[in-house]
Amino acid sequence: MIMKNNFIAKILWSAAVAAVAGSMALSCKEPQPESPVEPVDPNAPGEITISVPDTIQIPGEYPVPHPEIPMKIYDRECVVSDAGVSVEAFDITENNFKFTLRPGKDVASYKLDVYPLANLYNYMIDEGGLGADERTVERIILSHLFNAEGNGGYAFTAKDLGADYQEFTIDWGNSQYAQLAPVPDAQYIIAVAGCYDESASESAATELTLVYVCTDSKPLIGNPSVDIDVNAQYRGAIISHTPNADCAGIYYFGTNQDMLDPYVDAFGDRMLRDLMRHWYVPNTPIPVDNPDNLWYQIGPWDNPDPNLMITTVAFGVDANGTPGKVFSRKDFHLKEIPQDADEAMLKYELDPENYSATYAEYKITLGKECRSGYHYALKMDDYTADGNIAPARYYIEGTDEARAELANALALAGYGTANANFSFDEEKNEAIGNSFDGRWVDYNLTPDTEYVIAYCGKNFYGEITELHFSEPFRTKKLITDTPEANKSNIKLEFSDVTRTSIKFDFSYDPANTACFKFICIKNGDFNLSEAYSWVEVPSVDASQEDLWRFFNTMDQSLFMNLWPRSASGTDSYTLVGLEPGAEVAYAYYAEDMDGVTSEIKVATVTLEQMQVGDDPEVEIIPAWDEASKTWTVKFNMVKDCEKFKYTLNNDDNMYLYRLGTSEMRAFEFYDHWDQFVGMNGLETNYESVTEVSEPGKDHVALAVAWGRDENGAEVISKLEYVILTKDGQQKLISDYYPNYVEK
């Protein structure tokens, strides 16, 4: 089974989902007769009064324990022998429960965990517990409880707990031990195994105690339900969910049909519902207010089986987390790829007029039946820099299997180029678009080295071609000792200089420039030696020898900037987050199309000083976008500012829903917002920052500025604010309370 790990990331199924095997496989065994439980007579002479296991009857469902899974289970509390741990559960709510553990006098340590019953049943069906005897079932539970791989239970000893050892109470949902949060109307098993020594190990285990707890639930609000739409293609599918208005959240789940059905047949829909609610961490419902949460993808698979039936299920919960009564389910399979599908035709080759020592341009031709191409430049006789891909010669002279493996790797993680002219008639199984000519730029190649472009393509059905190779080519030698011969004419200037930002403006001869590199060698008082700890940072007036030594050492570091040429002969970008008044210096050089490097030049700039005064002022400039139904809000320093704090907020604690009501007085909004932004606003010394609102919600923009008087004491401005409605209106408090006088 595969489930979602977080709310934002999509589910990516591997090819393994098509296999029946796996740790989460839901396979079924033929039932065997239940082992009878011999009750203990509490009144028998010489016997300790201990609890008798329970059978919890649940109307319309299987009792607990399941008739085919023999377990000694106690309903909420039990007293066991001196060799076990007694348990008492109490304060059971919709999202939590507490329990007290009382080890017997022969118990020196114990292992504890709490399992959703649905998950415990999944262990049973997966590990041979369904239809087994009581000893087998107990062994399965103990194997999970004492698992040493990081998923086992928690160990407790008298040394750990001190005086609490004899009576230890755990507030489970609020404890550090609960990875899965209790959810409403869900069944749980508190499992605790006593040990006769302090090792808390399975070899020292004495008695296993299992206690049943079912959380409460509030009455269902409305009828939460979810519609499922499946877009099944040839190598994968996208599953989308549309919740109704009663849904506050949803759960969804997908796997092979033949893995899901045995579980449902054995345990019913309720257990499947609870399994879904406890399959990932955190196990909170998936919110319905963001469309990105409501879909997932399976595939793409390299060798899909169109006959494999796949099942996806979903259900909704209301605002209280109470699960809806309706399950949605879709069974589907992928489309079958036609046997006579056309192979993608494509070609990659070096542009002989446009390459240098570390730079090369490739000409790409994708045939009309080629949807996309993928490539990587390989050294003929050396591994790639990361060591993951063998030399090109290994594949050219090697086996079909090796080439197929590389083709699959390129199609997965190579550089991709889409055919912008691609079109396909699925009914006719025919490409009806046109071929595509494109280019690709490589600008971090090794000088004087033989390369080959390895490439493959995909057709409409995602079928990968065989691996192809370009004609070999050798990069030019890198010449660093004749900078006067360099033809790039590169120059770096700074513009738009503020107190925290600068704009880089590069200019060069595009016809005679291949690429250029640049790196910071001075940033105010910041000690660059801490960042460049493995090399001595040169000064602004350092010699060419020292600068080249620095560049060669830093060449492949994250701090080195490497840019290819632009057709315009100009490139720009803005760097922010600098310190006011700082002197900033960047060293740079260019490589021309002959492989000749320029001298290393240094460009410097000094940022504006901070102008701080006793009358700080900040402004808020909102702009409404009708298409996206969002606000773009700029917060700008106006004068005398050392810093300011700001927020664009739609949280309930802004009390926007109370505007225009008698629940709050007008001045209380202003005072509350003033205090809030001062304590919780984002702080910046930038002249300007921009925030964007969420669609469909009212917001308030807040800002307060800080300055200093002539004695250096802080001066704080008044609060600037504007209320921004979800329908594009700007308002003030006085728009809701006409008698209010704005400050």
Image (tube, rainbow, N blue to C red):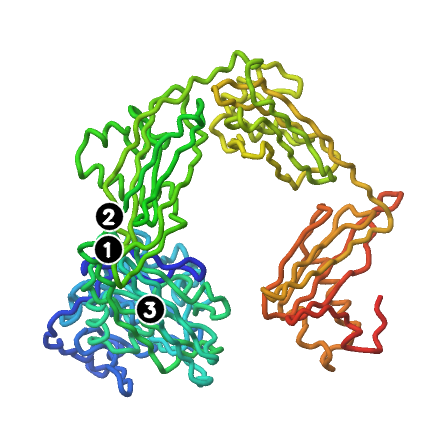
Seen as rendered, the residue at the extreme top is 481
Q: Is residue 140 above or below residue 322?
A: above
Characterize the local packing of mark 3: few (<14), some (14-19) or many (20 or more) Cα atoms within 10 angstroms.
some
Name the residue beneath numbered marker 1. 16
Furthest-right residue in this view: 710
What's the residue type where badge 1 is placed? Ala
Q: Position of residue 89 (x, y in %)?
A: 38, 75
Nearer to me, 333 or 180: 333
Q: Is residue 376 above or below residue 89?
A: above
Disc on res. 343: 2
Q: Earlier in the sequence, mark 1 or mark 3?
A: 1
Secondary structure state at the residue bearing disc 3: strand
Marks 1/2: CA distance?
27 Å
* Residue 250 x %, y %: 41, 72
- Residue type at tag 2: Glu
Per the image, label 1 sits on a secondary structure element best described as helix
Q: Is residue 615 left or right of residue 127?
A: right
Residue receiving disc 3? 230
Please report contact status of discs 1 and 3: CB closer than 8 Å, yes or no.
Answer: no
| Amino acid carrying mark 3 in the image | Val
x, y (%) of residue 229? 35, 71
Q: Residue at x 20, y 75 (%)?
A: 266
Q: Between 64 and 79, which is closer to the camera in this rendering?
A: 64
Residue at 27% across, 59% down: 234
In this view of the protein, can residue 142 be seen by the observer?
yes
- Looking at the image, residue 192 sits to the left or right of residue 184; the answer is left
483 or 708: nearer the eye?
Answer: 483
Contact (Cβ within 8 Å) of mark 3 with mark 2: no
Quarter containing the C terminus: bottom right
* Lower sequence index among marks 1 and 2: 1
Numbered disc in front, either 3 or 2:
2
